[in-house]
Amino acid sequence: MRGWARLRSSLQSLEARRTFSSSASTETRVGIAQLLSQSGNQSDVDVYGWVRSLRRQKRVAFVALGDGSTLESLQAVLKPDQAVELSVGAAVRLKGSWQESKGAKQSHELQVHDVKVLGENDAEHNPLQPKVQTADWLRTIPHLRPRIPGHTLLLRLRSQVIASITAHFNKQGFVQTHTPVITSSDCEGAGEVFTVSAGDSKDTKQHISGGGEIEVEHFFRTPKYLTVSAQLHLEALAQAVDKVWTLSPTFRAEKSDTPRHLAEFYMLEAEMCFVDDLEDVMDVVENMLGAAARDLLTSATGDELLQARSASVSDHENGHDRVTAEILQRRWAGMADGAWPRITYTEAIEHLQAAEKAGLSKFVFHPSYESGLQAEHERYLATNIGEPHQPVFVTDYPRAQKPFYMSPSIVTHNTKGTEDTAACFDLLVPDLCELVGGSMREHRLKELQRSMAERGINGAGLEWYQDLRRYGSVPHGGFGLGFDRLLCYLGGVGNLRDIVAFARWHGRCDA
Amino acid sequence: MRGWARLRSSLQSLEARRTFSSSASTETRVGIAQLLSQSGNQSDVDVYGWVRSLRRQKRVAFVALGDGSTLESLQAVLKPDQAVELSVGAAVRLKGSWQESKGAKQSHELQVHDVKVLGENDAEHNPLQPKVQTADWLRTIPHLRPRIPGHTLLLRLRSQVIASITAHFNKQGFVQTHTPVITSSDCEGAGEVFTVSAGDSKDTKQHISGGGEIEVEHFFRTPKYLTVSAQLHLEALAQAVDKVWTLSPTFRAEKSDTPRHLAEFYMLEAEMCFVDDLEDVMDVVENMLGAAARDLLTSATGDELLQARSASVSDHENGHDRVTAEILQRRWAGMADGAWPRITYTEAIEHLQAAEKAGLSKFVFHPSYESGLQAEHERYLATNIGEPHQPVFVTDYPRAQKPFYMSPSIVTHNTKGTEDTAACFDLLVPDLCELVGGSMREHRLKELQRSMAERGINGAGLEWYQDLRRYGSVPHGGFGLGFDRLLCYLGGVGNLRDIVAFARWHGRCDA
């Protein structure tokens, strides 16, 4: 039993040790954003960060310090000998007193007593240089790019929008869930998919170049794919909890090379039961985006995004399109205001034809009911319907243009729709075009099966999906929002490759 | 211009239409949980849900209605002829008045005026039957299983814990991010990985059974895998924003067949810079889990979990282990209380050896420093160190047992550690064992490279990871938490296959 006593006492000493742990812990440590907002003088301040710039004068040296919490830098004042070992990009700890500044540029500055270099920067070889570098080049160093203040800000933007939407949905009684990434079903029935196999790469049926194929064991018995949408699984979960949503990764093995497509991207998808009116689904989208936009309009992150837009240099730095602060603010306001125009596809086509006829716009493709909306048409609609920076819902597209799972318009109250159109919508925003797509889902078994048959979809892999219509089916609807696209729109970023920290597209998977 | 005028007017009529849209929209509709909490009588109430049970008497019929918002059912009182078309499992809309009940079981009930069947249930063929069905069977119908009230509750548990942790981290200044699923790096250097190839399955280097291989084009130029951890990418992002976290899917192509392993699972991972003490990282874990547990202790979801545990039938129904309400409550309290014991690996081994010597426990494997902690050892420690339902941190494992990226203990303040042990911890909880693993990360370039070389890790694919140590490196640490395991622990579920809605493991990927 002496072993026991010894252990007890050693545990007690461990407990005691804890109370003496470092005072500036991760959670109590003061970040630079917080310090900059404090106007009172403070004698003993510990600040951690990276040197953004360094100015040595004869009797004094100035360090601009950043820690990722704000675009702004903290000004630290050092004696020249304290700055000897410092260089731009180095990580440092500065101890000092927080005092009113004599300079005009800042209200306070840190009078440094003690300097500690935590990590040197090999400035000569650093691929990230403190000068203008092209967006293309920066995409080759995604592990360093987030350190550029404008890119750091985009990370904060993502975090804030997630937090806003999580809180909003929580309040609205939507249940957040995790849908599978590895799946058997190809939701859209179109689109290239990625195949998943076990690491020994003996796990797939393989066509040999000469013809023929090798049959091998599958990890999951049958071939599996990376999900292209959470929708089908969400529909199953919605029949348990009524209203459900997820923010999860989605994949397309498309060899597209555009600013608006990635091979891997986050989708925000939601499904809700007991809805028989497409308007309700659009209301949910409008309110959700409104909540995110309103948070942005009143937050520090929003202020900093505007500030970054005002400083023209950051446009180059970040590889952004020239979205001015004014445009950005109008986008947020347009989103926050709600009550966005809702027009049918037919009305949209009429509108476009009228615009073409009146010479108000020249389109490459003549707008017609049959040929569908081209990007140029969507762009025109997004800009010209409603206020210039208001999103626009276009509803009731021809069913032939849409996937098998959509209800015909006629089963919902919302239009003079027919069997020929689907109870669906796309949400278009200026510049970016399609941001959200949603619909009522066909909840009647026979009609669903007919729709699958018409499109040549084999129901075998979707037996479980049909089950949802056999056992207590309900009218329901939902939507999918391209989350990275939303961040591009809200952040004024022209290319998905710049809003996703580690972007993947055809031929490119750096880091 | 007449076209324009017509369009304007049609837009105006669209606007007008909106204001007349159905009054009981998704967001204003009253759910059953909400209604049950209202004690006042109401004359006109619309309720949507599924029939959980049906009792026909001569002059009256009783329907128990559920909509997924609560374990409890709403009692609806119908005339026998109103109930003719009803069956268990059907989706219905009931209109009626909300009145004080004469029955003792509920304070209020719905006196029904109008019944509408929204979707029939083919009760005879429904694989989900209103009787006890085995957990194994239920796992074959994941698209229907969530409808079982005990499983619905687990969906709400997941949602609540996500919301708690999102709010907590947001308050603490942690930036939430999305790390890539498709990646080149295999973080642990161990573990089987899934390979990703483009859908035409011509996209991989393939070993032919007879020997030799076929070279084919890769979608991303080189072979790519499903991520086994977000850690390396988080470390890069932490150097931009200081404190970062993600909740994202993670994969292992392991053919393990245990209740504690899945091929696809969610990990909550966090990294923080400017930390030189492992204690700080443990504090973050303790505070985060404490916040989630406290929310559970004071929430309706928590109450319902306890209620479900009291009703013994639900244990069978849900395939749960026999975790009583009392155990569950102690788990939450243990987690909420904080100040969990922290012992070193060496102390843990001594403790186990003393326990073995004193005859307090018989182990299959003799505990020794070299052979590592077995599951039985972890279980003993989790139960016997500290209070019985308190988690336990075990720190400073031998470096030989741990991955290349961990710092030796000696570079942190926290122990009498040496070069031989790593500045790392595992968090053990009773019954479940390892819940979280974390460490200080080796932030010194040369030492990192030496550690990689010692383990035979080729640095080529990890060049970018080494860069993080070249340019402004800082002491940093982080952790990974098995999110589905956490939910098992908090929800009293014994098998990961029952906490994940669509679970994937070797040979199984249903729906």
Image (tube, coloured by chain):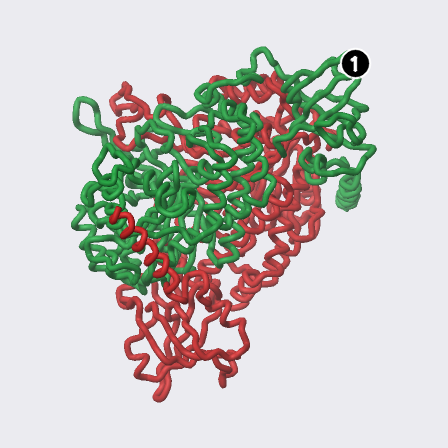
Chain colours: A red, B green
> Residue shown at 28%/44% (left/top)?
B188
The residue closer to the viewer here, A349 or B435, is B435
- Identify the residue at the far front of this view: A1
Residue B80 visible in image: yes
Residue picked out by circle 1: B81
The residue closer to the viewer here, B496 or A304, is B496
The residue closer to the viewer here, B310 or A197, is B310
Query: Is B262 left, or right, of B144 in this rendering?
Result: left
Figure quadrant of residue A370:
top right
The image shows residue B266 at horizontal and vertical percentages of: 42, 39
- Identify the residue at the far bottom of this view: A59
Residue type at numbered disc 1: Asp
The image shows residue A226 at horizontal and vertical percentages of: 41, 33
The image shows residue A43 at horizontal and vertical percentages of: 45, 79
Q: Is residue B352 above or below residue A106?
A: above
> Residue shown at 49%/43% (left/top)?
B332
Q: Is residue B503 above or below residue B160?
A: above
> Residue shown at 30%/66% (left/top)?
A119
Callout 1: SS: helix
Local crowd at mark 1 within 10 Å, few (<14), some, or many (≥20)?
A: few
Figure quadrant of residue A392:
top right
Residue A505 visible in image: no
The image shows residue A220 at horizontal and vertical percentages of: 36, 25
- Identify the residue at the far right of this view: B43
Label 1: chain letter: B
Query: Is B498 left, or right, of B505 in this rendering?
Result: right
